[in-house]
Image (cartoon, helix red, strand yellow):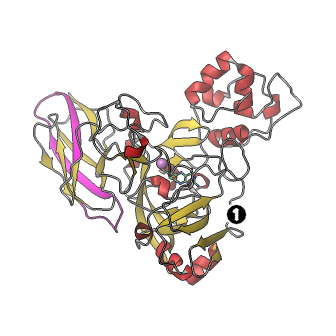
Amino acid sequence: MRLPKSKKLADIFELYADDPDRADWLVFGRKPHNDRRGFLKGVGLATMGAVLGAVIPFHRNMPSGFIPEAIAANRVQIAGKDGLTVLNDRPVNAETPAHLLNDEVTPTARHFIRNNGVVPDEMDAASWRLRIDGLVNNPLTFSIEDLRKKFDVVTQRLTIECGGNGRAFFDPPARGNQWTLGAVACSEWTGVRLADVLKAAGVKENVVYTAHVGADTHLSGKEGKLPLSRGVPIQKAMNPSNLIAFGMNGGPLHPMNGAPLRLVIPGWPGSCSHKWLKRIWLRNVVHDGPKMTGSAYRVPYYPVFPGEKVPESAMKIIHAMPVKSLITSPQTGLSTVGRDLSVAGHTWAGDGVVERVDVSIDFGASWKRARLALPANPYAWQRWTAELRFPRKGYYEVWARATDDKGVSQPFAIAWNPKGYLNNSMHRISVRVS
Ligand SMILES: Nc1nc2c(c(=O)[nH]1)N[C@H]1C(S)=C(S)[C@@H](COP(=O)(O)O)O[C@H]1N2
Ligand SMILES: [Mo]
């Protein structure tokens, strides 16, 4: 019996129906064929505990074929998270509904979770070490205390968006987590500048790329196999906004968001912001770790038709994320009696700045310019607000469209690509006026 690579919660129901033994193994880490003496200290059990928000002290007693009630009743909770929609339990992946992202600074409880592997058991800040090595003049090892003492400690609001945010809207569909809108957040991160730490180690002239290594482990359980190891070109790594962060919104990092130490490399796919960070290795080649190669985090060089086969040689690594916006207030589906409505949201644009946001209530026939704030600091998302008046009762949609400082606007429809990355099509919400 092989442990599946990943399982969506919905699939668990099917699995229990078809093969309760296999389901038990997946959910509780229990050996198949009702062998009640042999238990795996399974990754299944650990992640299920994370999804349920607690360990399961009596897991051995759970009758074969029983679905945990909290999952059966769709009342899944992740400890320290609030209102997230769980897309997958192995690895844990959860997104935040748009209306719960209305805060200018995303609270830790609302920051999405994107895991590729199994979260580490050990996240002790006092004994944590970070190694900087590879093509440096002085390989260095730091404790978190060393980082605090040796470098400027800075606090910045930084937007992190998963490269696959919006994948759920692709047609034909793309495999992977079916993110809708909520794999994005802008928390306030505290840490030291990645550039300062790299300079302290002495970056050699031939360095072209960073390589990031964390403490999470591969779903297969294979020793030494990394779930993910990505990197960025050294020019991007030296951007002063990048942090090695040990603080999140004035507190510690949430265990699912990389405690006790992570990279935050804003503006680029979230996968560059390595969690549970243990090592940064400087290389003289484009890094080729897991999820750097093949079609991972790559898009075609040229526009393709939906569903078109694209050879791997025609794919390039994603750099900056595209311009995008969200309507975070009101919640979609609003019914209102008044004809006036305030709408608000956030907007962001990879390495750039958003220059304008326009809103439409007539399916894009006409547009009204929204008020737009400057970012609190580079790479913070920008607040936008607009006052709308509906001409008569009926069903409306509010559409929002951002334009960045290069004059690039969000498209109406998705620019399709095989893996479902970079969907920055306009967000729309429905409003009924009676
Ligand atoms: N070590 C490690 N770092 C990681 C990941 C991971 O699986 N392991 N996932 C990456 C991806 S794909 C994203 S989008 C961001 C998400 O950060 P968050 O889970 O804190 O929201 O973390 C990145 N860092
Ligand atoms: Mo991601």
How many labels, in total?
1
**Amino acid type assigned to the residue bearing label 1 in the image:** Asp
Can residue 322 be seen here? The reply is yes
Does residue 434 sit above or below 41 in this rendering?
A: above
Q: What stretch of residues is rendered in magenta?
A: 373-401
| Left or right: 131 as drawn, with respect to 154 | right
The foreground one among 94 and 204 is: 204
Residue at 15% across, 28% down: 393
The foreground one among 368 and 243 is: 243
- Percent across and percent down for residue 2 are 71, 30
Quadrant showing the N terminus: top right
Can residue 276 be seen here? The reply is no
The foreground one among 389 and 273 is: 273
Does residue 260 sit above or below 395 in this rendering?
A: below
Q: Quadrant of residue 200?
A: bottom right
Does residue 366 sit above or below 27 in this rendering?
A: below
Quadrant showing the C terminus: top left
Residue designated by label 1: 124
| Left or right: 64 as drawn, with respect to 201 | right
Q: Quadrant of residue 356?
A: bottom left
